[in-house]
Image (spheres, rainbow, N blue to C red):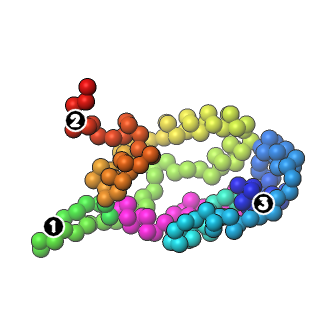
């Protein structure tokens, strides 16, 4: 992050843990090289992601974009519509006058009953990396999924075939093979 955004100012580091502060202070000063973000983006439509990333990666949590504002960012609109058009379980398709149409849910970005508390980040910034890793793991594994439905891969999604043939898909996520291999 420092390679891309440059060395943070002292006032941006006020909430950091001692280890991070010492690391930044002993490292040579780096100037921002935001142009590298643009060189990493290969698809022109993804250029909109850079302002969002810059807002999300601000060192000072008080100046960082809020979760609600990040979700409203224009970069996420296309992905949200793609998700709700074929992958989600909250919307459904119907046949109307012989045509298949999608009926969207009323709330495309529902609010979790136990939302993330920003104070948690402030408390975690005082922990060591190892303490933070353990606390974060416990937090994620004990958190209840939205509406009691665990996150799973939609095998009916238009891009499922591409996903299965990618290097991202894990064997445990793939459906059983139709062939009886010995």
Quadrant location, the N terminus? bottom right
Quadrant location, the C terminus? top left
Residue 115: x and y, percent?
A: 52, 51
Magenta segment includes 18? no
Q: Earlier in the sequence, mark 3 or mark 1?
A: 3
Query: Dot 1 surroundings within 10 Å: few (below 14), some, or many (20 or more)?
Result: few
Distance, label 3 to label 1, CA atoms, is 54 Å
Distance, label 1 to label 2, CA atoms, is 34 Å
The residue at the point 44 percent across, 41 percent down is 144
Q: Which residues are magenta?
A: 60-84
Indicate left or right for 76 with 157 as reference: right
Magenta segment includes 69? yes
The tally of labels here is: 3
- Do the residues bearing badges 3 and 1 touch, measured as CB atoms within 8 Å? no
Q: Which image quarter: residue 61?
A: bottom right
Q: Earlier in the sequence, mark 1 or mark 2?
A: 1
Residue 95: mark: 1
Indicate left or right for 127 with 88 as reference: right
- Residue at the disc numbered 2: 179
Q: Secondary structure at mark 2?
A: loop
Camera-side mark, 1 or 2:
2
Residue 21: mark: none
| Residue 148 seen in render | no
Q: Is residue 47 above or below residue 178?
A: below
Furthest toward the front, the residue is 182
- Residue at the disc numbered 3: 6
Residue 33: x and y, percent?
A: 74, 65
The residue at the point 51 percent across, 63 percent down is 71
The secondary structure making up most of the magenta span is helix
Q: Is residue 94 above or below residue 154?
A: below
């Amino acid at each position: 992050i420092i390679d891309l955004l440059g060395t943070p100012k002292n006032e941006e580091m006020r909430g950091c843990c001692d280890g991070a502060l010492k690391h930044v202070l002993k490292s040579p000063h780096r100037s921002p090289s935001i142009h590298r973000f643009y060189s990493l983006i290969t698809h022109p439509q993804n250029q909109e992601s850079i302002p969002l990333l810059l807002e999300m990666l601000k060192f000072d949590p008080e100046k960082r974009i809020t979760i609600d504002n990040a979700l409203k960012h224009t970069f996420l609109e296309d992905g949200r519509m793609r998700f709700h058009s074929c992958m989600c379980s909250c919307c459904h398709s119907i046949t109307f006058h012989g045509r298949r149409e999608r009926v969207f849910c009323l709330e495309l970005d529902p609010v979790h009953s136990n939302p993330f508390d920003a104070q948690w980040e402030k408390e975690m910034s005082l922990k060591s990396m190892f303490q933070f890793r353990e606390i974060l793991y416990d937090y994620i594994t004990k958190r209840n999924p939205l509406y009691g439905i665990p996150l799973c891969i939609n095998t009916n999604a238009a891009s499922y075939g591409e996903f299965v043939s990618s290097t991202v898909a894990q064997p445990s996520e793939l459906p059983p093979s139709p062939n009886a291999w010995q």
